[in-house]
Each structure stands twice: as structure tokens, then as C-alpha cells.
Amino acid sequence: MMKRRAAFLRACLLMGVLFAPSLQAQTAKPIVITFSHVVADDTPKGKAALRFKDLAEQATQGRVFVQIYPNSQLYKDKEELEALQLGAVQMLAPSLAKFAPLGVGEFEVFDIPYMFPSKTALRKITDGKIGAELLAKLEPKGIKGLAYWDNGFKLMSAKRPIRLPDDVKGLKLRIQSSRVLDAQMRALGALPQVLAFSEVYQALQTGVVDGTENPPSNMITQRMHEVQPYATLTDHGYLGYAVIVNKRFWDSLPSDLRAVLETALRDATRYGNEIAQQENDAAITAMKAAGTTEFHAQTPEERKAWMAALAPVRQAMEARVGKDLISAILKETAGLSSN
């Protein structure tokens, strides 16, 4: 009897050893990545974030859970970077202009009007050495830069027609916080107004501001076309994002898990950047169909007038973003001049 009991206990012990890892795997809590952003789910950034969530959770087989909070549900523009540095969130995709207040003003080079003549030129920078060097500048701030996501090239919208630069004079135009964008609007004779993205619709509706600049997908998902009777397809500037994580959190992850997440992010980046232009084209079509906004396509002469009016901004911003950086980008993108 005693021998049978001892054998039974040894068998139970052996079974416990054999099944302990699987039980532990089943009961271990997943690593939660809180991903906050300020735009809607149905924008290029929103869709890319959701794609990353799906890919990351599938590839890690339950080891990682990605919580996405869109539309400034957790933090507004000015709050989200501090939240990331403090570890309140683990992942963001802020617009590139947001890094200047951290002391990394070089990212404002992406705000310089007509800096990137085409998507091909832009991609040569974001996918190349210059883009990688810019992301590396975030690391001393406790931030790890992982990827660049497109939204697209911007249009100008307002309460009155703005076909030529002089038409902008005196208008109060919303911008995100950026010295370059401030200089851009002042070069046109406009009055720049810094507002959080989540506040723009109400500001346009109530007349706090007269107009703004945005890629079409942002304009439609925030319903700005309902309160902006005129828009001109200027393509004067680019709006993109950097996907970033809290560096301490990222470095604490097992190396194999980081590799899986990097692959998921790479695939989500490819997807998001591919659909960005499609989303913007569809947004223009939908807004035209809504009939609330009159869209104007620039003539070549009008485009030349806008470029001439905004040309001084690049030179004025050399001291802020770096003359050598501007020169390096111009050299790298020379000849890539058609969208």
C-alpha cells in the first residue's frame, strides 16, 4: 500500500514538473502596451495602430496586449509626450513637430513648406540614414523612435476662398505648436493660433479661428469640412508621425519579444504608409460629395506664387533646425520632384 502511494506521489510530482511551464504560460499576465494618439481610428494613423495591435497580439500568442486610445481619450497634444516619459503610456505616434519642445528642434524640418517635392523624396529621408539619425536624437530624452508613419500632404481651408497667398492675409489659422508653422503662416500674412487637435472643430465652428491646414483624412474624420466652406489643394507641407515608445519599458522587454514587435510594427508601417494616399483621395471625394466645402485645385501659376511667398521660411529656419540638415536633405532628394 505504501509503495503504491509513493509511486502515485512520484507520478504526480513528475506531472507537475511536466505541466508547470504550460500552466505558467496560461496564467502569466500579458504585457500591456498602452498606445495613445489624438486622431480617429479611421485615419491612416488610426488604421496603422489597429493593424499593429492585431499583428502584435497574434505574433506574441497572448504575451502582449495592445490597448489603443484614439481621439485624445487619454491625453491631448501637449500632454502625451510627458505621459510617455513618465511611463503612464508606453507607445505614441505624435506628429513630428511635437519633439521641438523636448529640445530636438531638428524634427521641425518636416514642417518646412515645400521641403519634400514628392513622396519618393520623403521616403528617401524617412527610410534612410537621415531619418534614423533623427530618431536616435530622442534616446537621451528617454524615448525610443521606431518608425515613421505618413498622413500626407496638407491643404489649406478657410471661411473664404484662398487661391493666392494674399487671400490668407489677416485670417486666424490654427496650427499645431511649431515655430516653423508659425513662421509659415506669418509669411503669408496670417495670424497663427496654436490649438490642440481635439479643439479645432469647435474653434472653427465658433469663429475662434478662421481656417487651418490638414491632410484631407484629418479634415473629414474631425468633420472640419462641415465648418470650412473653402479649401485649396496646396500640398504645401507634409504631416507625418514618429512611432515611439518609452525607452526604459522597451529595453526591459525580452530581446525575442522586441524582435517580434519590431516585425509587427514594420508590417503595420508598410500597410499604413500604403493606404495614406488612398485615404486622403477618398476623403476629398467624400467631402466634395457632401457639398459643404468648395475645393480648388491650384493652377501652375498659383502654385509658383505660393512657393515664392513661402520660400523665405526655409532660410529663416536654418538656425533652428540646422543648416547642415537642410542641405543634406536637399542633396539627398535632388531630382525627385514629382508627386
Image (cartoon, rainbow, N blue to C red):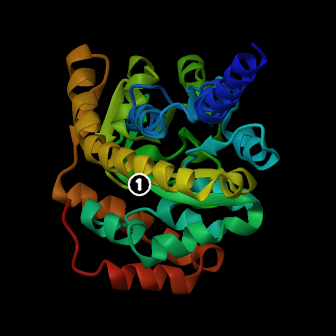
Outermost residue to the right: 86
Image quarter hosting the N terminus:
top right
Q: Which kind of residue does numbered mark 1 sit on?
A: Tyr
| As drawn, 57 above or below 187 | above
* Residue 172 image point, x, y percent: 57, 38
**Image x and y of residue 317, in percent:** 58, 73
The number of callouts visible is 1
Q: Quadrant of residue 218?
A: top left
Q: On the picture, is 277 further left or further right than 200?
A: left
Asked if 228 appears above or below 106 in the picture, the reply is above
Residue at 45% across, 56% down: 148
Q: Quadrant of the C terminus?
A: bottom left
Residue at figure coordinates x 41%, y 30% from the top left: 219
Task: Quadrant for residue 79, please give it.
Answer: top right
Out of 6 and 257, give the one closest to the viewer.
Answer: 6
- Kindly identify the residue that appears in the image at 37 percent across and 37 percent down: 44
Residue 321: x and y, percent?
60, 73
Q: Examine the rendering and report whether any part of residue 268 can be seen.
A: yes
* Residue at point 57%, 66% (across, down): 135
| Residue at mark 1 | 238
* Tag 1 secondary structure: strand
166 left or right, relative to 298: right
**Of residues 44 and 89, which is closer to you in this image?**
89
From the viewer's perspective, tell me whether residue 240 is left or right of residue 233: right
